Image (cartoon, rainbow, N blue to C red):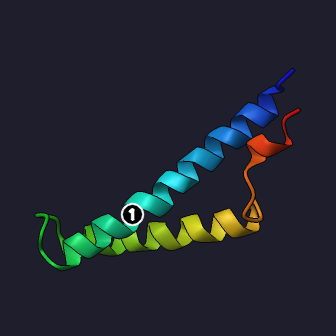
Amino acid sequence: MVTLKQRVDHSHFKTILTGITIMPIIAILGFLNVIPVSNTVAWLSLAGFFISLFKFFFTFKGRNPAKDIN
C-alpha cells in the first residue's frame, strides 16, 4: 500500500525533474532572444534550474523515491 508521504515525495520528484529539463531551455533561448522574454525571466529560469539541481542531489540524493515503494 502506498502512503500519502510516498505519493507526495514522488510528485515532488517529478516536479524537480521537470524543472531540471525545462528551466535551462527557457534560460538559453531567452538569452539568445529566440523566445520573447526579458533577461530577468531568463536569469530567474537559470536560478530555478540550479535550485532544482540542488534539491535533486541533496533532498533526493539522485534517486527516484518511487523505487522505494514495495
Q: In front: 45, or 24? A: 24
- Residue depicted at 44% across the width and 60% down the height: 21
Secondary-structure class at tag 1: helix
- Residue 21 vs residue 5: left or right? left
* Amino acid type assigned to the residue bearing label 1 in the image: Met
Work out which quarter of the rendered image holds the N terminus and state it: top right
Task: Give how far across and how far down residue 64 sits, in percent.
Answer: 73, 51
Q: In front: 11, or 66? A: 66
Rendered view: 18 above or below 45? above
- The extreme bottom residue here reads 32
Work out which quarter of the rendered image holds the C terminus and state it: top right
**Res 56 quadrant in image:** bottom right
Mark 1 lies on residue: 23
**Res 53 quadrant in image:** bottom right
Task: Give how far across and how far down residue 50 sits, in percent.
Answer: 52, 73
- Residue depicted at 12% across the width and 74% down the height: 33
Rendered view: 10 above or below 16? above
Rendered view: 13 above or below 26? above
Q: In front: 64, or 41? A: 64
Task: Answer few, some or many: residues within 10 Å of disc 1's Cα (few below 14, many 20 plus, some between 14 and 19).
Answer: many
**Res 42 quadrant in image:** bottom left
